[in-house]
Image (cartoon, rainbow, N blue to C red):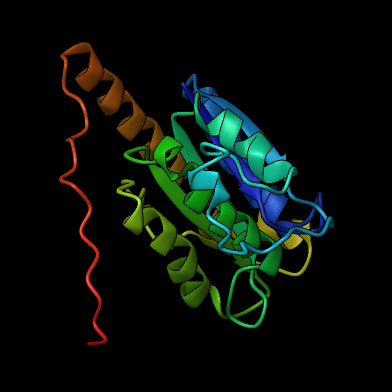
Amino acid sequence: MKVLLINGSSNLKGCTFTALSEVAMILNQEKIETEIIQLGSKEYHDCTGCGLCRSALNGKCIYEDIVNEIIEKAKEADGFVFASPVYYAHPSGRLLSVMDRLFYAGGKYFAHKPAAALVSARRAGTSASLDVIQKYFLINQMPVISSSYWNMVHGSQPQDVQNDKEGIQTLHHLAKNMSYFLNLIQLGKENHIYPPQNEKREFTNFIR
């Protein structure tokens, strides 16, 4: 089993990476493979709504960048953690641009797979940021992995995160809950229990 951890921070070794590393450490102890994907400081296109990913490109985004790389990895991945620093009480713009395109172009590779949101902040804005990230999971039928507190850590520097003992403990519990859920899914597959088949999608206009 494998979990992809996406770091939405431009700081490759900052607070968000430190938090993800704690989650990865516990998952590895639980015999689950992990990979941290760094979005870094590169620029990423927003979704332009061209629709080609759902027609001519068959699940690939028209912009050839890390989005298509993650979609390919998502095909084989079993779970996901999306993490971000808090900017003005919301996740980083780069993470949201990537997630918009990921879930529009490659949503079928994420469906029914467990996911968790994780945020880091100096002080506040964490709950609002978690809510934004988790909405991607909820619309895509992904079980949301919880912990013993909201999935957040606090600090301005990586060492501050390490000193946030309750935050670190929350991340450890999150990782163990992810492992537990992945093992339940694997047990279900071994007993021929699979995700439900959806009804044909309905689209309702509210403006008449």
In the picture, measured across the screen, residue 194 lies left or right of residue 133, that is left
Q: Position of residue 109 (x, y in %)?
A: 44, 35
Give residue 93's quadrant in the image: bottom right
Q: Quadrant of residue 71?
A: top right
**In front of the other: 9 or 179:** 9
Horizontal side, residue 206 vs residue 43: left or right = left
Q: Residue at x 30, y 48 (%)?
A: 141
For the point 66% across and 64% down, which residue is it? 46
The extreme top residue here reads 190
- Which residue is nearer to you in this view: 96 or 146? 96
Looking at the image, residue 23 lies above or below residue 117: above
Left/right placement of residue 29 relative to residue 180 reads right
Q: Position of residue 25 (x, y in %)?
A: 60, 33
Does residue 18 sit above or below 119 in this rendering?
A: above
Q: Give residue 77's position: percent from left, percent from top.
A: 50, 28
Residue 69 location in percent, x, y?
67, 35
Q: Residue at x 15, y 45 (%)?
A: 199
